Amino acid sequence: MKKIFLLLAVVLGMAVTQANAQQKQPVRIGIKAGVNLAEWQGETINTAQDLMEMTNGALNRQMREGFHVGGVVSIPIVPGFEIEPGLLYSQKGMRLTGKIPMEQFDFLNAGVTVTNKSEYIDMPILAKVFIGEGFHIFAGPQFSYLLSNKVQVQAGALGFNALNQEWDIKNGFRELDVAATGGVGYRFASGFNVSAGYDYGLTTVDSNRNFDTFNRVIKASVGFTF
């Protein structure tokens, strides 16, 4: 998987060099960062949804909050159209929270939270179409390499934590994740830009396909293009 990432990086580097030599508009380097709201969708979540209904709301599904940060290269092809590869660190995963489903124990405020914390290196390759001065839409494939995968369990009652533990669980999870990504943004004349996008995972997070579950991520970003 690492060799695939290295090959993609070399190809993109050659594309940048070739575009810079042929285009009157300069290739621009940029940085970006922002927040992630991540979840899983598929068989695992369908099973969790069934449990939520059976427990009458005692089990809840939530998005995992995280962030992304990295760099991009904007390669002008023709006026109003650019190719933008990037390399970003990105946090994904999902979260389930539960409580004792009995009213007589409500005073304990007892609950448990299970969070899957996945850390990826994302390599999106976006096609950007500019409409008007700075508004643009973008879409393209994204290749992600799984750096680590941890499961955190937190449990407590009456405001006290009784358990807070993490386990490394990378075996069985797919190292290379492929997604389609797209969204909208605006780039100001100064180079400052904002965007919002959505990652739609196309490969299962489970390498053995024992359950068909996929990454889904909502992203909001700010950045600057030099």
Image: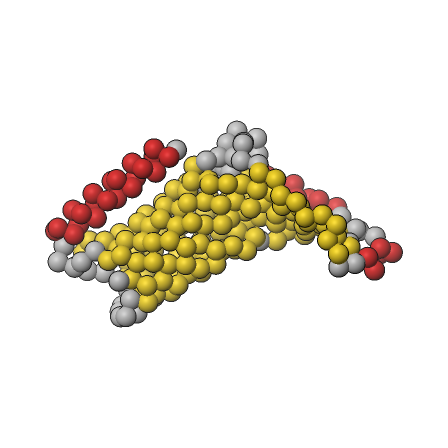
Residue 90 percent across, percent down from the top left: 45, 50
Residue 111 shows up from this direction: no
- Is 217 or 108 nearer to us in this picture? 108
| 207 left or right of 124 in image | right
**Residue at (71, 47) in percent of width and height:** 163
- The quarter of the image holding the C terminus is bottom left
- The quarter of the image holding the N terminus is top left
**Residue at (58, 48) in percent of width and height:** 94
| Tally of marks | 0
- Is 166 or 37 nearer to us in this picture? 166
Residue 162 percent across, percent down from the top left: 75, 50
Residue 48 percent across, percent down from the top left: 66, 44
To which quarter of the image does residue 131 belong? bottom left
| 24 left or right of 89 in image | left
Point out the residue furthest to the top here: 208
| 109 left or right of 143 in image | right
